[in-house]
Image (cartoon, rainbow, N blue to C red):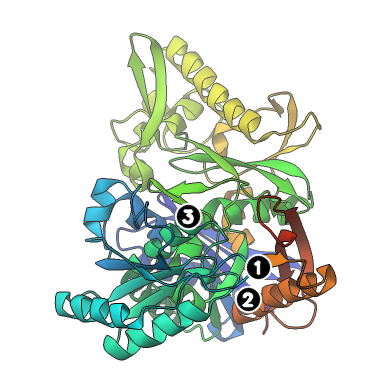
Amino acid sequence: MIRIGIDVGGTNTDAAMITPDGVLASCKIYTTGDIMSGVRTALSRLLEISGRPASAVSAVMIGTTHFTNAVVQRRDLAPTAAIRLGLPASACLPPMTDWPTDLRDAIAGRGYMIAGGNEFDGREIAPLDETALRGIAAQLRAQGVGSVAVSSIFSPVNAEMEHRAEAILNAEMPGVHVTKSHEIGRIGLLERENASILNACLRDLSRTVITAFRDALAQSGIQGAMYLTQNDGTLMDAGFAERFPVMTFASGPTNSMRGAAFLSGVADAIVVDVGGTTSDAGLLRGGLPRQAGIAVEVGGVRTNFRMPDVFSVGLGGGSIIRQAEGGITVGPDSVGYRLADEGMVFGGATLTTTDIMVAAGDASLGDRSRVADLPPALVRDARRAITALLEQCVERARISADMLPVLVVGGGSILVDHETLAGLPVMKPAHFAVANAVGAAIAQVSGETDRVYSLATVSRDAAMADARKGAMDMAIAAGAAPDGLEVIDIEEIPLAYLPGNATRIRIKVIGDLHV
């Protein structure tokens, strides 16, 4: 089986071809303005380097920051309505209450609350107000709104009302995109609702982007299946990704961490991924990224879906170096994919971290004579500033006194020429520059459930079995092979403030791709 992994970053598009024997070929090119032509170029180059025909490729896995960037930059977002099923409860905080004003305006955000929702044990708070829902649908249809996020209180426990609401909206608004919150986030209502609204406003963009990816594969002659990597380091098929674009958030750093584990053979480590614009550091446990235990903000919005616990700083191979009264500053702005034109060693006029490493004799690329006249004190101080930022990354990712290795990967890894960082040994595995693409190529498929059970009415074993089945069903729907699914994480939390011996159970399973 031959797989191709592609990671589309802000500076570089990386690609790697993987066989059961390891990495067969890899390449790195600058990300193009339209992104898709860069993907086609990367695919063509891989096939040329490897000498393998396009027909031999069985699957292509793509990681992209396209959807994250759309939210952060407030662009290409569809007008979206949020409908919460929960009255008479939850009226004090309407949908999108805590959103940045510019993001709410970018999606022309509309929020509605109607009767419905469930208690933690699945009992109704109130029946779904179908009449009010049909009235809202008529308003939205008249306004031309095509994306709706539906969130019901405790829908991960009982999703019946969200399913019913979707059926009504589809009947009243033919062609509408409906995102149901129980398919997106965990128990917490506001964070789950926020994630659902973000997903809804990206649905039109996801169709455009994924269609373009499919076209890029077709133009390269590749007929294998296409998958996208999601934020927990696992895969989802293209159809699933088109429905749930928010699941791709943070997939870049996650791919790098998984690739670092695969290339080095080290399952427990701190990984520092140095790109062209940022450096991302995270902790590997058992070959998988440590997940964030708290709500994660995306574009200023609190969400609660699966995200790796990653610390980022504005340090990359294209970061701009400046001299100020207080000393040397590094970044956070970067020339990005324009490094080949604007970096001094490539004939440009902008001093970057890459120029500093070449001037110091720690890297060989471009024309060193163009930086030969840089003052030695400037080079020395800039090197110290770069090292300080790298050590800050490592310290933030470190959560114990264990002497874990630091795996350094990414195209900007020329910034790291140390044997140790923050007192920990540094390793650079083979193919470190394209670890993110390797991580995409070797990714598995996961599923997760997060529910509250009343153990006064159901046994603990039955609750565990139900949660496990839900997680497995999610994994299979995302493209996992039914055989060989493995439970990798179980969290069981008694909720003393709720009656009926309430217990929150979260189970995550992982398995190989179904081919």
Relative horizontal placement of residue 437, taking residue 331 as reference (left or right) = right
Relative horizontal placement of residue 82, taking residue 269 as reference (left or right) = left
Q: Nearer the viewer, residue 87 or 447?
A: 87
Does dot 2 land on a helix, a strand or a loop?
helix
Q: Which mark is residue 38?
A: none
Query: Is 11 drawn above or below residue 8 in the view shown?
Result: above
Does dot 1 land on a helix, a strand or a loop?
strand
Q: Nearer the viewer, residue 17 or 474?
A: 474
Query: Is 334 drawn above or below residue 52 in the view shown?
Result: above
Q: Quadrant of residue 350?
A: top left
Do the residues under discs 2 and 3 have CB atoms within 8 angstroms? no
Does dot 3 land on a helix, a strand or a loop?
helix
- The residue at which mark 2 appears reads as 474
Query: Is 167 drawn above or below residue 470 in the view shown?
Result: below
Do the residues under discs 2 and 1 have CB atoms within 8 angstroms? yes
Q: Nearer the viewer's eye, disc 2 or disc 1?
A: 1
- The picture places residue 342, in percent across and down from the top left corner, at 31, 38
In the rendered structure, which disc, 2 or 3, sits on the residue that comes first in sequence? 3
At 46% from the left and 66% from the top, the residue drawn is: 42
Q: How many marks?
A: 3
